[in-house]
Image: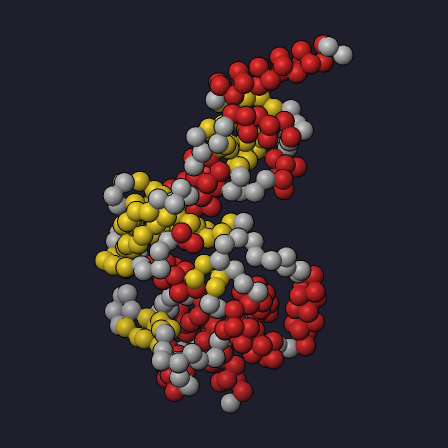
């Protein structure tokens, strides 16, 4: 009986790690016959797990959603990750889920073995929140968008840009990116025929979904985080700059938010900075405050502006 129970746990773990398994593949992983796999699948169904089965070359077993949530198997690192995520959610950031996150956290911590409780307690005492990092978003809105990204469902919504101008958008959602306390949706804008970045907290509450769309290669070769960084830090501003900084990227990376600039290593001693600003004046002051040497590649107007600043400073120093 103990051997059977252990095998059922291993089978359930396998079903949770992949969308679909063939009977032969499960039998090989469990070192049993396919007939035993079928019996074990029936036992899991009797315990409340919904497991779909299909025959044919593309058939197999698939763990599906049921009417109620059955027990979930988590490895040690997965349990710690879930607990930390629930604690963060309970503290805010996504509105409407704080109480539910707290209830789930209490249930999870009651089930953790002592060794994991000690590790989690150490992590909790080391994490000191200082208020929300950014604007909060509605949990239902975030869940609706995430599901549309997963299922490739088109979205329609009202969007307010940073100038508070409202527009209706029809998009094919690609994915969500979380950066510096904000949630961003990367999507193909059907009316503009191009990729766009949308702050989720600026998306209207009423979101329409459907129909399905065919998947396409995302921007930046599928690197959505890099696309959001470029869109928010550079493309959104009237002045866009490319500057070579005379310092290693690893040294400077901690000083830049991905929403403020994009850094790319050039060699061991230099890196390329791509950023934007509302004016040449703001950009020039910001670069000087970095306290590192730099070369301006673009725009040419920035170089001329810095030359004029240098001349003014030179005249001031000459009067001393």
* Residue 220, placed above or below residue 33: above
Instruction: Identify which residue, 35 or 219, lies in the foreground.
Output: 219
* Rendered residue at 42%/78% (across/down): 69
Q: Position of residue 194 (x, y in %)?
A: 31, 40
Residue 96 in percent (x, y) is at 46, 67
Question: Residue at the spot x=73%, y=10% of the render?
Answer: 319
Whether residue 294 sits left or right of residue 122 in the image: it is: left
Tag count in the figure?
A: 0
> Could you tell me residue 223's position as x and y percent?
44, 44
Q: Is 14 drawn above or below residue 42 in the view shown? A: above
Q: For the point 48% across and 64% down, which residue is it?
A: 95
Quarter of the image for the C terminus: give it.
top right
The reply, left or right, for residue 277 in relation to residue 40 is: right
Is residue 186 visible in the rendered structure shown here? no
Q: Nearer the viewer, residue 283 or 264?
A: 283
Q: Residue furthest right?
A: 320
Q: How is the image coloured?
A: secondary structure
Relative to 233, say whether 240 is above or below: above
Residue 202 in view, yes or no: yes
**Quarter-of-image position of residue 116:** bottom right
In the orientation shown, which residue stands out farthest toward the left? 211
Q: Position of residue 10 (x, y in %)?
A: 49, 75
- Residue found at x 51% / y 42%: 259
Q: Nearer the viewer, residue 159 or 16?
A: 159
Residue at the far bottom in the pictured view: 1
């Amino acid at each position: 009986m103990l051997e059977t129970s252990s095998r059922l746990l291993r089978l359930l773990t396998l079903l949770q790690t992949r969308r679909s398994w063939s009977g032969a593949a499960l039998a090989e992983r469990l070192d049993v016959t396919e007939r035993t796999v079928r019996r074990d699948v029936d036992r899991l169904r009797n315990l409340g797990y919904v497991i779909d089965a299909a025959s044919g070359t593309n058939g197999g077993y698939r763990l599906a959603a049921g009417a109620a949530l059955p027990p979930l198997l988590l490895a040690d690192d997965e349990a710690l990750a879930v607990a930390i995520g629930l604690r963060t959610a309970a503290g805010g950031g996504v509105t409407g889920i704080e109480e539910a996150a707290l209830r789930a956290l209490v249930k999870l911590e009651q089930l953790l073995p002592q060794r994991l409780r000690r590790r989690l307690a150490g992590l909790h005492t080391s994490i000191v929140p200082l208020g929300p990092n950014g604007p909060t978003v509605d949990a239902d809105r975030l869940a609706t968008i995430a599901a549309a990204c997963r299922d490739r469902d088109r979205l329609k919504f009202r969007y307010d840009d940073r100038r508070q101008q409202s527009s209706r958008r029809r998009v094919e959602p690609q994915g969500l990116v979380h950066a510096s306390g904000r949630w961003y949706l990367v999507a193909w804008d059907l009316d503009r025929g191009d990729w766009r970045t949308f702050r989720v907290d600026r998306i209207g509450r009423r979101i329409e979904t459907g129909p399905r769309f065919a998947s396409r290669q995302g921007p930046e070769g599928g690197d959505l985080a890099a696309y959001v960084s470029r869109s928010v830090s550079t493309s959104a501003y009237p002045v866009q700059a490319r500057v070579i900084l005379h310092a290693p990227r690893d040294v400077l990376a901690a000083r830049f938010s991905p929403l403020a600039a994009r850094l790319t290593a050039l060699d061991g001693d230099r890196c390329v900075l791509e950023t934007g600003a509302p004016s040449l004046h703001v950009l020039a002051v910001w670069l000087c405050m970095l306290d590192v040497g730099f070369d301006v590649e673009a725009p040419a107007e920035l170089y001329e502006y810095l030359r004029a600043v240098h001349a003014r400073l030179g005249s001031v120093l000459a009067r001393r």
